Image (cartoon, grey):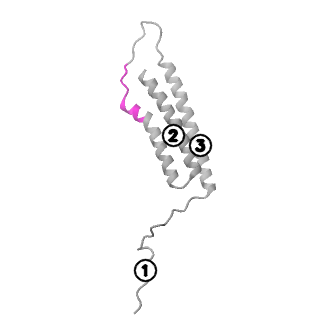
Protein backbone atom coordinates (compact mmCIF):
# COMPACT_ATOMS: atom_id res chain seq x y z
CA UNK A 1 0.00 0.00 0.00
CA UNK A 2 1.37 3.44 -0.90
CA UNK A 3 1.59 6.16 1.69
CA UNK A 4 -0.46 9.27 1.06
CA UNK A 5 1.32 12.30 -0.39
CA UNK A 6 2.08 15.00 2.15
CA UNK A 7 -0.08 18.06 1.88
CA UNK A 8 1.89 21.23 1.20
CA UNK A 9 -0.42 23.31 3.34
CA UNK A 10 0.19 21.25 6.46
CA UNK A 11 3.98 21.44 6.44
CA UNK A 12 5.49 24.86 6.96
CA UNK A 13 8.46 25.63 4.78
CA UNK A 14 11.21 27.24 6.87
CA UNK A 15 12.81 29.31 4.12
CA UNK A 16 9.66 30.65 2.56
CA UNK A 17 10.49 34.23 1.60
CA UNK A 18 7.91 36.92 1.12
CA UNK A 19 7.52 38.08 -2.42
CA UNK A 20 8.46 41.73 -2.71
CA UNK A 21 6.12 44.17 -4.44
CA UNK A 22 7.06 45.46 -7.86
CA UNK A 23 9.32 48.49 -8.18
CA UNK A 24 6.47 50.45 -9.74
CA UNK A 25 4.23 49.80 -6.75
CA UNK A 26 7.03 50.73 -4.37
CA UNK A 27 7.75 53.99 -6.19
CA UNK A 28 4.06 54.95 -6.48
CA UNK A 29 3.44 54.35 -2.77
CA UNK A 30 6.62 56.30 -1.96
CA UNK A 31 5.47 59.26 -4.08
CA UNK A 32 2.04 59.31 -2.47
CA UNK A 33 3.55 59.16 1.00
CA UNK A 34 6.12 61.81 0.07
CA UNK A 35 3.34 64.23 -0.86
CA UNK A 36 1.38 63.48 2.30
CA UNK A 37 4.51 63.72 4.47
CA UNK A 38 5.48 67.05 2.90
CA UNK A 39 2.04 68.48 3.67
CA UNK A 40 2.28 67.27 7.27
CA UNK A 41 5.78 68.69 7.80
CA UNK A 42 4.92 72.07 6.25
CA UNK A 43 1.71 72.35 8.28
CA UNK A 44 3.51 71.43 11.51
CA UNK A 45 6.31 73.91 10.81
CA UNK A 46 3.84 76.69 10.03
CA UNK A 47 1.87 75.90 13.16
CA UNK A 48 5.10 75.94 15.15
CA UNK A 49 5.94 79.42 13.84
CA UNK A 50 2.43 80.78 14.42
CA UNK A 51 2.14 79.36 17.93
CA UNK A 52 5.70 80.39 18.74
CA UNK A 53 5.09 83.96 17.60
CA UNK A 54 1.84 84.12 19.53
CA UNK A 55 3.41 82.91 22.74
CA UNK A 56 6.42 85.23 22.75
CA UNK A 57 6.58 87.22 25.93
CA UNK A 58 5.94 90.89 25.75
CA UNK A 59 8.66 93.20 27.04
CA UNK A 60 6.04 95.00 29.12
CA UNK A 61 6.06 94.02 32.80
CA UNK A 62 2.25 94.02 32.89
CA UNK A 63 2.06 91.02 30.58
CA UNK A 64 0.32 88.05 32.10
CA UNK A 65 2.39 84.95 32.66
CA UNK A 66 1.08 81.77 31.17
CA UNK A 67 1.10 78.40 32.88
CA UNK A 68 3.85 75.91 32.14
CA UNK A 69 1.44 73.01 32.52
CA UNK A 70 1.26 71.23 29.19
CA UNK A 71 -1.52 68.65 28.79
CA UNK A 72 -0.52 65.03 28.35
CA UNK A 73 -2.41 64.87 25.05
CA UNK A 74 -0.13 67.57 23.64
CA UNK A 75 2.96 65.53 24.53
CA UNK A 76 1.32 62.46 23.06
CA UNK A 77 0.77 64.25 19.75
CA UNK A 78 4.22 65.89 19.69
CA UNK A 79 6.12 62.65 20.32
CA UNK A 80 3.53 60.20 18.98
CA UNK A 81 3.83 61.38 15.38
CA UNK A 82 7.57 60.54 15.15
CA UNK A 83 6.89 57.18 16.81
CA UNK A 84 4.18 56.35 14.28
CA UNK A 85 6.42 57.52 11.44
CA UNK A 86 9.23 55.26 12.67
CA UNK A 87 6.81 52.35 12.86
CA UNK A 88 5.75 53.05 9.27
CA UNK A 89 9.37 53.02 8.13
CA UNK A 90 9.97 49.67 9.82
CA UNK A 91 6.78 48.18 8.38
CA UNK A 92 7.69 49.24 4.85
CA UNK A 93 11.18 47.85 5.28
CA UNK A 94 9.69 44.54 6.44
CA UNK A 95 7.40 44.58 3.40
CA UNK A 96 10.55 44.82 1.28
CA UNK A 97 9.68 48.23 -0.15
CA UNK A 98 13.06 50.00 0.03
CA UNK A 99 12.10 53.28 -1.66
CA UNK A 100 9.06 53.75 0.56
CA UNK A 101 11.08 52.79 3.65
CA UNK A 102 13.66 55.48 2.86
CA UNK A 103 10.95 58.10 2.34
CA UNK A 104 9.36 57.15 5.66
CA UNK A 105 12.73 57.19 7.43
CA UNK A 106 13.36 60.74 6.18
CA UNK A 107 9.88 61.70 7.37
CA UNK A 108 10.74 60.23 10.76
CA UNK A 109 13.84 62.42 10.96
CA UNK A 110 11.83 65.51 10.03
CA UNK A 111 9.19 64.64 12.63
CA UNK A 112 11.83 64.10 15.31
CA UNK A 113 13.40 67.49 14.49
CA UNK A 114 9.98 69.17 14.71
CA UNK A 115 9.20 67.32 17.96
CA UNK A 116 12.38 68.68 19.52
CA UNK A 117 11.48 72.18 18.33
CA UNK A 118 7.93 71.85 19.69
CA UNK A 119 9.28 70.55 23.00
CA UNK A 120 11.65 73.50 23.35
CA UNK A 121 8.84 75.90 22.54
CA UNK A 122 6.43 74.28 24.99
CA UNK A 123 8.96 74.28 27.81
CA UNK A 124 9.91 77.95 27.44
Residue drawn at x 38%, y 26% as measured from the top left: 70
Which residue is found at the position 48% from the left and 66% from the top? Answer: 15
Dot 3 or dot 2: first in sequence order is: 3
Identified at 54% across, 29% down, the residue is 45
Q: Which residue is mark 1?
A: 6
Q: Is residue 63 above or below residue 44?
A: above
Q: Residue furthest front?
A: 15
Magenta stretch contains residue 5: no
Q: Residue 98: image x %, image y %? A: 57, 51
* The C terminus sits in image quarter: top left
Q: Where 61 falls versus 116 (above or below)? A: above
Q: Is residue 70 magenta?
A: yes
* Residues drawn in magenta: 67-77
| Mark 3 nearby-residue class (10 Å; few <14, some 14–19, many ≥20) | some
Residue at which label 3 appears: 34
Residue at which label 2 appears: 108
**Label 2 crowd bin: few (<14), some (14–19), many (20+), radius 10 Å:** many
Query: x, y (%) of residue 29?
Result: 58, 50
Amino acid sequence: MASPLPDDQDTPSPAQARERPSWLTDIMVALLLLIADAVIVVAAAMLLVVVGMGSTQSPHPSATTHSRDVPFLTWLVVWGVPAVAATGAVVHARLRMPVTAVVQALFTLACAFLAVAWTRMLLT
